[in-house]
Amino acid sequence: MAFARSAGAWFDAPTGTAISILLGLFTLLWTLFHIISFASTDLHPDFLEVYAWSRHPSLGYYKHPPLDAWIAWLWFHLLPAQDWAFWLLAMVNAAVALFAIDCIARHRLSGDKRIVALLLLLLTPFYQFRAQPFGANQMLLSTWPVAVYCFLRAFETRRPSWAIAAGCAAALSMLGKYNSVFLILGLAVAPLAHRNGLAYFRSVSPWLSVVSGLVVLTPNLVWLGTTGFMPFHYAVTVHADSSLSSTLMHSMTYFGGAISYLTVLLAVYLVSVRPNWATLQGALWPSDSDGRMLAVLLWVPIIAPIPVAIAINARLSSLWTMQAWFLLPILLLSPQRAIVSRSAAIGIAAFVSATSLGALAVSPALAWAKFFGGVEPSRLCFQSLATEATERWQATTGRPLSIAAGDPDLAAAVSFYGKSHPDAVPIFDIKKAPWVNSSRQAQEGFIGLCKADDTSCLSRAQQIARDWPDAVRVDLHPVPRFAGRNGIPQDYTMWLMPPLAH
């Protein structure tokens, strides 16, 4: 069989070469999948929000810490602000995650198992479908494995360079999203499961990590203090649960939902490896110290959020576990009795290839499905709305548009798709976009955008317009188009707030 021969040659290649081929093909194929399957729609609002933030690198933003915006700032200094570039960024981030996971795997696995660990992860939705839209959650796909790898190297070698790298990597995870505190808890507890754990704590290594991590985090901590911990207020507002019983219910479904993401991975593992109960026990709680430390690093960040959520009455989402499962296939394959034959490895590679190519094959149909109701309607016309709003502004004022306010998704869409890439002010609140102040608004003017049925946004815009001389209300009705077909017109209201005369 041609595929079996090709796969066998790939497995027989030097492992580093085989991994490089896998990651290159992964990035190319899934970038193409997203470009094609989303050809009928515009970017997810999370993409657009990150872009709007990235135009003003900051120590933090009102929703999240700043790492994803920093990455986007660098990325869009190298590539144009176009959809394909954002899809590529999301898949490169996922590929970096898989590379870091392989760096960990090479210390526990050998032969075909090392590649199979990555193939099993590709049977979860985390690195293809959930890796987009690029945002705070997706940022952790790469930062958590990097932090764990640096920690393991620091623990093993006690070298100051690795200790400092571990602290900085853990801090960067916190700058990706603050729930990385559960990763740090795992890093702090994991050495206790190792026979040399006390010796590690007596060394200078963990303290170098703590100091270097605090150095990286301190500017953001200062920013949090000076802004009244805005991201925490946002999180509490959005994720607060209605009652203790509801919190308990969400906490139970949290873990069950997380396991459901692993259904295909676990099924393929059980069929391919056929482990007995002793092998499974040895995988999930290994007999060796190194393995037990990995098990702690897997389970603590997944389980620890449950009692915290109950204590603060917050809703947990199963999706928040996606960055934590990367150690699972390494643990499952680590026992010597977990044997992966060459034919089983080729079978797993064939299954991953078939599902990936199958997804690419149906991507045009997915684009049509999204156009006819598969996404939130506004995503069908973000770009056309931004173009029309910008043209109306320029025709009225004769100057480039520099500020777009109002509905957060619409303002961010104009920031990305608008010709002049104006700054976005969500909900007309300059506290959420501190690079825009009342003086700038008066000197440069701005537009306000609302969905026609959003009474809260409309009321706020009308209130501002009453106090703004020469404000003009305009109704916009962009029509989505894809492959020569028209969609259902969308209704928006825009206020033109020209610069105030001096």
Image (cartoon, rainbow, N blue to C red):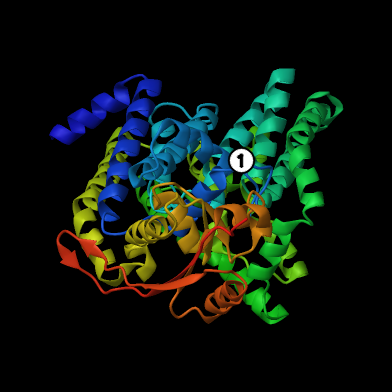
**Mark 1, other Cα within 10 Å: few <14 / some 14–19 / many ≥20:** some
Q: Residue at (83%, 24%) from the top-left corner?
A: 203
Q: Residue at (30%, 55%) from the top-left corner?
A: 38
Position of 114 compared to 408: left or right?
A: left
Q: Position of residue 424 (x, y in %)?
A: 54, 55
Q: Position of residue 256 (x, y in %)?
A: 53, 66
**Amino acid type of the residue that numbered disc 1 sits on in the rendered structure:** Pro
Residue 403 vs residue 340, the one in the foreground: 403
In the orientation shown, which residue stands out farthest toward the right? Answer: 202
The kind of secondary structure element at disc 1 is loop
In the image, residue 333 above or below residue 469:
above
Figure quadrant of the C terminus? bottom right
In the image, residue 369 above or below residue 189:
below
Position of 189 compared to 439: left or right?
A: right
- Residue 243 lies in quadrant: bottom right
Residue 345 vs residue 68, the one in the foreground: 68
Figure quadrant of the N terminus? top left
Q: Position of residue 341 (x, y in %)?
A: 33, 35
Identify the residue under disc 1: 57
Residue 86 in sight in this render? yes
Q: Residue at (62%, 76%) from the top-left corner?
A: 249
Q: Residue at (33%, 38%) from the top-left corner?
A: 26
Residue 140 in sight in this render? no
In the image, residue 87 above or below residue 484:
above
Residue 349 vs residue 141, the one in the foreground: 141
In the image, residue 183 above or below residue 209:
below
